[in-house]
C-alpha cells in the first residue's frame, strides 16, 4: 500500500506539471514564442486562467444555437451524423429553457373551437360514434369498478378522465395498425369491436375469455383486433413495439405500430431502449405517453426534471408533439397527422398527452392518501373530456338531452347484462392451465399436470369447486 501511495503521489505531481505546462503553452502562445489571441504577455496568463475558473456556473449555461455557415475545416469536425462546428466560447446547454413546450389544443373548456386552431374536420357519424363510445367506456368502468368492490372481480382499474385519449386515438387509426397498450386503454378495443361480453368474460376469468383465466382481469388482448395482450410490467411493450414496427417496415406494410405508456414508464430502461431502437432503425411506430400527473402515488415532480416527456423525443432524434389529452378533437387530429408522418416517412413519433387520472390508480389504491379531493374534483367536473366534447357535438346540432338519457340507460343495461352472464359462465378447465403455449406439451408440463391432478384428488376440499377437472 505504501509503495502504491508513493507511486500515486509521483503520478499526480507529474500530471499537474504536464497540465500546467500544457495550459500555459496553449494559452500564452503557439510554441513559436508568439502570443496568441488576447494573451500578449506571460504575466497575464495565470490571472486570466484563474478568472475562468472562478466564473459563476450560471454564466456558462445558456440555450446555445450552433451554426455551420463557416466552411473553414479548422472551424468544424466531420463526425458521424453530420458536421459539428467548433466554438471558442465554453457554454453548457441549459438543463431547461424559460419557455415550456406549448400544448396543442382545439377546444376550450366550453367546447368552443379556439380561433385560428387547425384540426381535421370530423363528420357527424364519426363524432357521434366517438361520443357514444366515450360514454360507454365511462359507464363500463363505473360498473366494473363497483363489481370489484362487491367481491365479484379480483381487480380492476379505470380510464376515468382519459376517455378522449382512448377513443379519439382509436378513431384516428386504421384496423391494420397494431396496438401495444399499457392497461388504461380498453377504449381502443371497444372502438374496434371488442364487445362488452368479451370484456366481462376476461374480467371474470370465464372459459369464454380470451385469457381463459390465466391473466389479470384487465389484461385484454385480441389477435382479431391487432391488440397485443396487456402486460402489467411497466414499459416492457415499448421495445417490443419497436421490433414489431420494424417488421412492418421490412414487409412494406402500409400500417404502423402504436405503443402506450404512462409518465412513470418513461423512467424505465425499456423506454430508452424502445425509443432509441426505433429512431436508429427508423421503425414506423408512434409512442404515446399518457402524462396524467401520477404514477400510482408518485407525482411527475418526483418522476423527472425535464419539461415533461415531449422534450425527450429530440434527444433520441424523434419528432414530438404535446397535446391536450382532454380535448377529443386535438387528440384525433394529432394522432392522424402523426400516423401519416410515421407511415409516409417511415420514422417514429412521440406524442405526449397532458391529462389527469381522475380515478384511483386501481382497486388496490386510495389516491386521497396522497392528493387532495379538491384537485380530483376540479379535473372531474371542470376539465372532463366527455363534457367538453358533448358541448361541441351539441353545438353542431348532432346531439340532444333525450339521446343522452337513452344512451346512458342502454349502456348501463348492456354492461349489467354482460356481467350477469359472465358471472354465471363456467370457468376454464384445469387442462387450460397447460395449453396454448406448445403444440405438443413437453414432458415436464405433462408431469406437472399429473402431479396437480393427484394433489387435487387428495385435497379436493382445498380447491375451487367451480373449476372443471
Image (spheres, grey):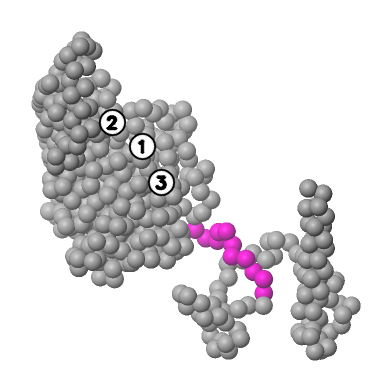
Can residue 366 be seen in the rendering of this structure? yes
Q: Nearer the viewer, residue 112 or 193?
A: 193
Q: Earlier in the sequence, mark 3 or mark 2?
A: 2
Point out the stretch of residues depicted in magenta: 89-104
According to the picture, the residue beneath numbered tag 2 turns out to be 156
- Residue at left 24%, top 51%? 179
Asked if marks 3 and 2 touch (Cβ < 8 Å), the reply is no
- Quarter location, residue 295: top left
Compared to residue 165, the image places residue 376 above or below, namely: above
- Please, what secondary structure does the residue beneath circle 3 have? helix
According to the picture, the residue beneath numbered tag 3 turns out to be 265
- Please, what secondary structure does the residue beneath circle 1 have? loop
Q: Earlier in the sequence, mark 2 or mark 1?
A: 2
Asked if marks 2 and 1 touch (Cβ < 8 Å), the reply is no
According to the picture, the residue beneath numbered tag 1 turns out to be 358
- Residue at left 67%, top 74%? 89
| Number of marks drawn | 3
- Residue at left 73%, top 61%? 56
Amino acid at each position: 500500500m505504501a509503495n502504491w501511495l508513493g507511486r500515486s503521489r509521483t503520478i499526480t505531481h507529474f500530471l499537474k506539471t504536464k497540465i500546467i505546462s500544457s495550459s500555459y503553452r496553449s494559452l500564452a502562445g503557439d510554441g513559436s514564442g508568439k502570443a496568441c489571441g488576447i494573451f500578449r504577455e506571460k504575466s497575464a496568463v495565470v490571472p486570466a486562467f484563474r478568472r475562468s475558473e472562478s466564473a459563476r456556473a450560471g454564466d456558462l449555461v445558456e440555450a446555445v444555437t450552433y451554426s455551420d455557415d463557416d466552411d473553414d475545416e479548422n472551424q468544424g469536425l466531420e463526425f458521424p451524423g453530420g458536421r459539428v462546428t467548433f466554438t471558442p466560447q465554453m457554454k453548457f446547454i441549459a438543463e431547461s429553457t424559460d419557455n415550456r413546450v406549448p400544448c396543442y389544443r382545439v377546444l376550450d373548456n366550453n367546447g368552443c373551437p379556439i380561433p385560428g386552431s387547425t384540426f381535421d374536420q370530423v363528420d357527424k357519424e364519426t363524432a357521434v360514434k366517438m361520443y357514444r363510445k366515450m360514454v360507454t367506456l365511462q359507464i363500463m368502468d363505473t360498473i366494473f369498478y363497483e363489481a370489484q368492490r362487491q367481491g365479484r372481480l379480483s381487480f380492476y382499474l379505470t380510464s376515468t378522465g382519459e376517455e378522449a385519449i382512448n377513443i379519439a386515438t382509436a378513431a384516428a387509426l386504421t384496423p391494420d395498425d397494431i396496438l401495444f397498450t399499457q392497461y388504461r386503454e380498453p377504449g381502443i378495443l371497444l372502438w374496434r369491436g371488442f364487445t362488452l361480453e368479451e370484456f366481462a368474460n376476461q374480467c371474470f376469468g370465464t372459459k369464454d375469455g380470451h385469457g381463459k383465466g390465466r391473466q389479470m382481469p384487465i389484461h385484454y388482448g385480441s389477435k382479431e383486433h391487432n391488440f397485443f395482450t396487456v402486460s402489467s410490467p411497466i414499459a416492457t411493450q415499448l421495445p417490443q413495439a419497436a421490433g414489431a414496427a420494424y417488421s412492418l417496415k421490412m414487409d412494406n406494410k402500409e400500417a404502423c405500430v402504436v405503443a402506450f405508456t404512462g409518465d412513470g414508464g418513461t423512467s424505465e430502461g425499456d423506454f430508452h431502449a424502445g425509443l432509441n431502437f426505433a429512431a436508429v432503425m427508423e421503425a414506423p411506430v408512434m409512442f404515446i405517453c399518457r402524462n396524467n400527473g401520477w404514477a400510482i402515488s408518485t407525482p411527475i415532480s418526483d418522476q423527472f426534471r425535464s419539461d415533461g416527456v415531449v422534450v425527450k423525443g429530440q434527444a433520441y432524434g424523434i419528432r414530438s408533439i404535446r397535446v391536450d389529452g382532454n380535448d377529443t378533437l386535438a387528440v384525433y387530429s394529432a394522432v392522424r397527422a402523426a400516423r401519416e408522418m410515421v407511415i409516409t416517412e417511415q420514422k417514429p413519433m412521440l406524442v405526449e398527452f397532458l391529462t389527469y387520472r381522475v380515478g384511483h390508480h386501481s382497486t388496490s389504491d386510495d389516491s386521497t392518501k396522497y392528493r387532495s379531493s379538491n384537485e380530483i374534483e376540479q379535473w372531474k367536473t371542470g376539465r372532463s373530456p366527455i363534457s367538453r366534447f358533448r358541448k361541441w357535438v351539441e353545438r353542431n346540432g348532432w346531439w340532444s338531452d333525450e339521446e343522452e338519457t337513452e344512451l346512458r340507460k342502454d349502456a348501463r343495461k348492456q354492461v349489467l347484462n354482460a356481467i350477469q352472464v359472465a358471472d354465471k359462465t363456467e370457468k376454464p378447465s384445469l387442462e387450460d392451465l397447460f395449453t396454448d403455449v406448445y403444440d405438443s406439451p413437453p414432458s415436464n408440463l405433462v408431469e406437472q399436470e399429473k402431479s396437480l391432478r393427484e394433489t387435487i384428488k387428495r385435497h379436493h376440499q382445498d380447491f375451487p369447486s367451480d373449476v372443471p377437472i
